[in-house]
């Protein structure tokens, strides 16, 4: 091959190699492309590293419940609603025994989706205020002052 043809051939091959190198993507660092507070788990998925509100405060978790026919009282319904939540009902709190013995209204046999907190408030009714001890993860109800003085 003549020197001129050889030079042109090498230049053409060199240009092709440069073009291939230029279009080859650089390796992707998943952490560098993820937004702060997120981890890239695969090519198109970012997952938050933050805890969800309902994980920090289980009373904010969303629930749907349908009480079985074996649940007759508010006490039984509250116990079933709190099962698995990490919270316990302090039935020994003043006047909670009266609440526990009340019949479960048909209208609340099926509820949701709503937060666990709202479900408890709905079960107890407007005359009761939900009290929460986050340290011990216990709940109980106190009658509102306007209803406390009414005859029994």
Image (cartoon, helix red, strand yellow):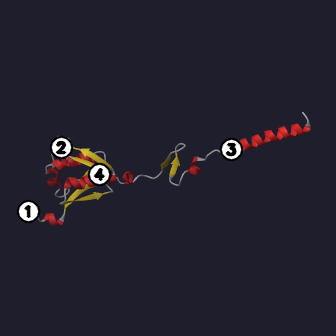
Sooner in the amino-acid sequence: mark 4 or mark 3: 3
Q: Residues within 10 Å of mark 2 (few under 14, many from 20)?
A: some
Residue where numbered disc 4 is placed: 114
In the drawing, does residue 22 fall left or right of residue 88? right
Q: Disc 4 on helix, strand or loop?
A: strand
In the drawing, does residue 95 fall left or right of residue 83? left
Q: Nearer the viewer, residue 35 or 102?
A: 35
Does residue 6 lie above or below 38 as drawn? above
Q: Residues within 10 Å of mark 1 (few under 14, many from 20)?
A: few
Q: In whole angstroms, how far apart are the C-alphas of marks 3 and 2?
A: 68 Å
Q: Residues within 10 Å of mark 4 (few under 14, many from 20)?
A: some
Residue 148: x, y in percent?
14, 64
Q: In whole angstroms, how far apart are the C-alphas of marks 4 and 3?
A: 52 Å
Residue projecting furthest to the left: 151
Viewer-nearest of discs 4 and 1: 4
Sooner in the amino-acid sequence: mark 3 or mark 1: 3
Residue where numbered disc 2 is placed: 71
Q: Disc 1 on helix, strand or loop?
A: loop
Q: In whole angstroms, how far apart are the C-alphas of marks 4 and 2?
A: 20 Å
Q: Are marks 4 and 2 in contact (CB under 8 Å)?
A: no
Q: Looking at the rendering, in which quadrant would you find the N terminus?
A: top right
Asked if residue 92 shows in the view, the reply is no
């Amino acid at each position: 091959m003549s020197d001129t043809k050889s030079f042109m051939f090498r230049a053409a091959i060199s240009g092709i190699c440069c073009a291939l190198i230029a279009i080859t993507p650089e390796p992707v660092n998943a952490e560098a492309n993820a937004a702060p507070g997120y981890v890239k788990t695969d090519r198109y998925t970012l997952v938050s590293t933050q805890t969800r509100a309902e994980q920090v405060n289980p009373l904010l978790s969303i629930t749907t419940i349908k009480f079985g026919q074996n649940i007759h009282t508010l006490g039984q319904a509250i116990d079933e609603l709190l099962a698995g939540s990490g919270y316990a009902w302090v039935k020994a709190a003043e006047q909670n025994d009266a609440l526990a013995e009340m019949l479960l209204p048909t209208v609340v046999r099926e509820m949701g989706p709503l937060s666990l907190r709202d479900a408890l408030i709905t079960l107890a009714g407007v005359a009761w205020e939900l009290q929460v001890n986050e340290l011990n993860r216990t709940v109980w109800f106190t009658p509102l002052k306007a209803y406390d003085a009414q005859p029994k």
